[in-house]
Image (cartoon, rainbow, N blue to C red):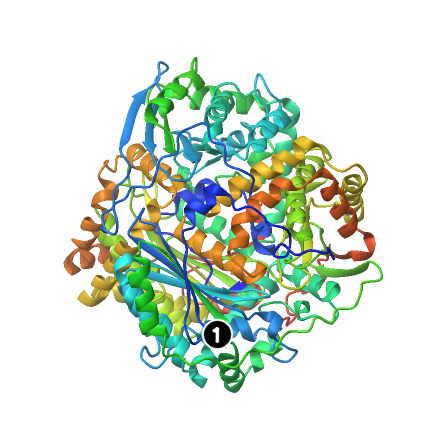
Amino acid sequence: MSKASPRSSAVRAVDPTLAALFDVHEATLPNGLKVRLLANHQAPVVSLYTFFQVGSRNERPGITGISHLFEHMMFNGAKKYGPKMFDKTLESNGGRSNAYTSNDMTVYYDDFSADALETVLDLESDRMRSLRISQETLTREREVVKEERRVRVDNEIPGMMDEELGTLVYKAHAYRWPVIGWMADIENITREDCQEYFRTYYAPNNAVLYIVGDIDPKKTLALVRRYYGGIPRGPSPAPVLNAEPEQKGERRAIVRHPAQSPSVMIGYRGPAASSEDTLVLDVVQYILTKGEGSRLVKSLVYDQKAAVSVMLDWSWRIDPGTILFYLELKPESDPAQVEGLLYAELEKLTRDGVTEKELQKAKNNLRADHLRELSTNSGRGHALGHYEALLGDWREGLSLPTFYASVTAEQVKAVAAKYFAPERRSVVTLHPDAGANEPGDDVDA
Amino acid sequence: MASRKIASVKNTVRKAAKAVRKQATAARKKVAQVRKAAPARARGKLKVVPAPKSAATGELKLPALHESTTSTGLKVIAAERGPLPLVSVRLVMRAGGAWDPQGKDGLADFTARLLRRGTKRLDADGISEAVEFVGASLYAGVNEDVLSVYLTTPAEHFSAMLDMLGQVVREPTFPEQEVVDARERALAQFANDLDDPSSIADRAFTRAMWGEHPYGRDLGGIKRTVSTFTREDVVRFHAERMGPRVSLLTVVGALAPETVAAEAERAFAGWTGGPDTPPELPRKQEPLARAGQVLLVDKPDQTQSQVRLGGPGFWLGHEDYFPATAMNIALGGGFTSRLMNEIRVNRGLTYGVSSYFDTMSAGGVFGLSTFTKTASTREIIDVALKEIHGVRDGGLKPRELKDAQSYLAGLYPLRTETNESVASVIADMRIHGLGDDWVEKFRDRLRAVTPKDVARVSKKYAFADRPVIVVLGKASEVKPLLEGLGPITVVPASDYE
């Protein structure tokens, strides 16, 4: 792990373009709810985000998937707005809502017409204050989530491989199981489990509210106080222990499933979001797979014609995450051979490093993508929440440009050498197998 | 990451999504989203436009449109918009998949992909390097009607990037080896797509709806047609179909309109070729190819069935657009729609269900898309048909219509939030003759729809005749469940490679 987190590192300057975009008004209510408000009058719309610091990371075997199942339950009725009324009220007022759950957090968001602001605050505060969890809605919502699992994991090749990879990379940590949970756990989570989850993690002191768009920050804060101020504070949730042991060598698994082509998914153990290495890995990710001229796309897809596509995902996480590669191959390919080509590229990176031009290109693209992300209210709200949840303070996001600009070729080389070591690697190979799941097999028993 | 609902399953008008069909494959989307992180330092040479200060008026206006025409006959529209130092460009040509030559399905799409694989001045690597170095992106895609090239760039690099856009459309060289490689990649992708149940169901549905009509072709082509593509095919397509007189260039972002006009003149100087006037398909609602029939695509490894239902719709700019759109929001648009309520909320049969109008320049369809576990395949179809027929026979309640109108009117401004979306809506307004007041008047026109209007269009579009039914799943278990819905044809998934 690197010595310094971004927070503790010496003064990192805020990017002036970003500073101008982020005139954020902040407050913390007496019950612990943090509020961040940002005006943008370009269109008569508003985005509201609520970040709860809870995800599959906070689960345990037996209730895997509860964070996500519970996320669904948040739309099924509270005290003032009963069953079906949340969506009904919001949509008939010119708004829409959705949510997602990740390993580390659960995020709710609403986009709506600016004149619906007070209605949305009423709706959102109602469910934070007094969610009602009925057995009937839980039973039905469970079926919906099972269909979600079928469509994303059980009937999707990358989904099933990703699930397999998780259990290889992690032995002890809760990142081991998929966010959507194991099918048997989804079946068995009880109403009491959900109620306990609500009490523990959905208290105002475990949440941050972001409101971005056509608003008056002062008036909006007064409204937030009125609607959320009376919600009682909850106990502090128990911290999550990271008991993950050191990895001593490469780990491998095979998935047999009817498919046209083999494919390969590889995970290297990465650092935690708070490590500076994480930001250097952002640069590495861009050098390897951003654009047709990036190293891996050019080499594996265009020059050597060994892969149909190559993907690299490096997503920040609270505890050490996974640097994930996914190679989509051609029919009749030899996955071992393509794996070898990938490793050769990674070795080249760790041995020879990168050119100044490549480095500058990655920085230019990081900046352009960041600006694009910030071009909508929703993008700005999400960015604020994402930085605050993973780096501890949304301001860290404003100084990221300065950090990226300072990354050197030596840092890139050192970080690549550190994380792309074979003993940090887990590999899942899909073997196309027409014999598996013949008609008549009951795979969904 | 898991969530409550698949984001934007289907939009009312799905053109934009279809234009970039398969740029990102289903596989790549599903694993994880490649997170976008952050940047370096601002040093703009070009002036940045401040955000308009019209606070909370609720009004919706596009930036002023500045029109010009280059000496070669290319129409240019510039719209100045800040505050971010970014520019979005869309070059749209009437050269979509509907005009693929006989037996060459997918040629427009194939040509579009090859544009940036070599020009008279640069090879593919040179182009990638120039575009990607500055943080710009450049790609091309097709839908049924048009071929579009999309460019987004930091404003300070606009001039160089527009020049690149000019190069790739004016003088692509289509190197032989690039054509061979692209063909091989496309064929491998077709094979792998057989493992993506939702794409195959969509392909089967399109073919079942349109049959021999040009809109029934697979936009990306199929194994049989793409295998025959040669460099000559591509060169001919480029020369005959792409040219300044059938094109429109839209530029939206932090740039003065005079700059845009001057740069366009320079970047497209000397561009010749293509037809003099845009080709048109006759506007006519063709009979559905498989009305009243059931097509069952067999994929034995599935534990879930993909379900598609469809009937006739209408073309872009049709007078039924607003009442039909309001009807669809209430029937299968939002989270409180009748279909969502009955199928997901009350019965837990699926994770996602939506209905939509897919509108093209000469025709369109009304469709439904959903999925469920194998055992409930018949139930989900029955419930969906019952709901659609309910609207056909009874229209909407006044309150339902009012809610649908408020919903869409409230969210409509989101469609004009980014430079990309503004560039797209401008192109659509012009190409399909929607009128320059389309955005401004959209909400008034929507709010003017009456229950009587809805009743009229419901009778027309909510399956007045028997729909096309397409199911992809484990045929041995699904087929008995479908008895009585109509004649059933079972085909293997490999028919759609």
Q: Quadrant of the C terminus of chain A?
A: bottom right
- Residue B114 horizontal/vertical position (percent): 56, 29
- Residue A186 horizontal/vertical position (percent): 57, 76
- Residue B367 horizontal/vertical position (percent): 37, 54
Q: Quadrant of the N terminus of chain A?
A: bottom right
Q: Chain of mark 1?
A: A
User: Looking at the image, which residue sits at the far front?
Assistant: A11
Query: Is B348 drawn above or below residue B225 in the view shown?
Result: below
Q: Position of A313 compared to B280: left or right?
A: right
Q: Nearer the viewer, residue B445 or B459?
A: B445
Amino acid bearing label 1: Asn
Q: Position of B6 compared to A313: left or right?
A: left
Q: Is residue B211 visible?
A: no
Residue identified by numbered label 1: A205
Q: Count the marks.
A: 1
Residue at horizontal 23%, vertical 66%?
B400
Check disc 1 and report its element: helix, strand or loop. Answer: helix
